[in-house]
Image: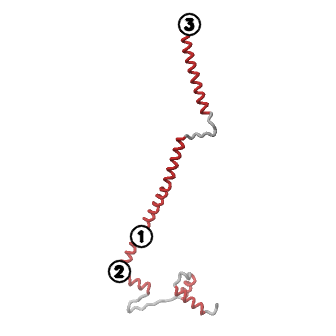
Amino acid sequence: MAANRDRFSTATKIRILGEQTAARVYRSQTRRQTRRPAGRSRLTGRAAFLVLVVCSLIVALAYPMRQYVSQRGEIADQRQLTREAGQRVEELRDERARLKDDAYIQRLAREHLHYVLPGETGYVMADPRAADERRTDQDPADRPWYSNLLDGVDSADRTDR
């Protein structure tokens, strides 16, 4: 029985020794994790390399993306100009078609150039008050050149300067 007790006590000793060793390993691991130096970063080499690669990609793609966005804006502007030019072309085609009509030309000549047909008498009435109002209201740059010239001659002839 003495041999049996030695065997039992040896197995018990080994079990206790194993438990003690496991407890020591666990304590040393937790101490190592909690006792990290203050200056040491948690950033590993792999994480730093990953950050470097991501930053490089961002820098490498920033300029092409900016160019892409600005070119898309330019394309939109050019399309708008093309639409406006197309509208202007249509307006000019309509005007050209109207100018081929003799009645339209005759109406324009009567309105703007004060033309009259043979046998008609044309009258142009000048209101002196309206002419004075126009002179005072208009900027000299907006008036025809001959009006400015005649006003200069009239003011030179005045004696009440």
**Residue position marked by numbered label 3 in the rendering:** 2
Image quadrant of residue 135?
Answer: bottom right
Image quadrant of residue 149?
Answer: bottom right
Q: Is residue 14 above or below residue 149?
A: above
| Residue 2 in the image, given as x and y percentages of width and height | 56, 7
Which badge, 1 or 3, is on the more N-terminal residue?
A: 3
Q: In front: 124, or 71?
A: 71
- Give the position of the C terminus as an image quadrant: bottom right
Q: Exactly how many numbered labels are in the figure?
A: 3
**Residue at image x 49%, y 53%?**
61
**Could you tell me if the residues under marks 2 and 1 are in contact, i.e. CB atoms within 8 Å?**
no
**Residue position marked by numbered label 2 in the rendering:** 100
Q: In front: 41, or 91?
A: 41
| Residue 52 in the image, given as x and y percentages of width and height | 53, 47
Q: Is residue 132 left or right of residue 82?
A: right
**Residue position marked by numbered label 1 in the rendering:** 85
**Other residues around mark 1 within 10 Å, as few (<14) / some (14–19) / many (≥20):** few
- Give the position of the N terminus as an image quadrant: top right
Residues under labels 2 and 1: Cα distance? 23 Å
| Residue 33 in the image, given as x and y percentages of width and height | 59, 33
Residues under labels 1 and 3: Cα distance? 114 Å
**Residue at image x 49%, y 89%?**
125
**Residue at image x 37%, y 78%?**
98
Which badge, 3 or 2, is on the more N-terminal residue?
A: 3
Image quadrant of residue 35?
Answer: top right
**Other residues around mark 3 within 10 Å, as few (<14) / some (14–19) / many (≥20):** few
> Which numbered disc, 2 or 1, marks the residue closer to the eye?
1
**Residue at image x 40%, y 91%?**
120
Amino acid type, callout 2 = Lys
SS at badge 1: helix
| Residue 53 in the image, given as x and y percentages of width and height | 51, 47
Q: Is residue 121 left or right of residue 132?
A: left
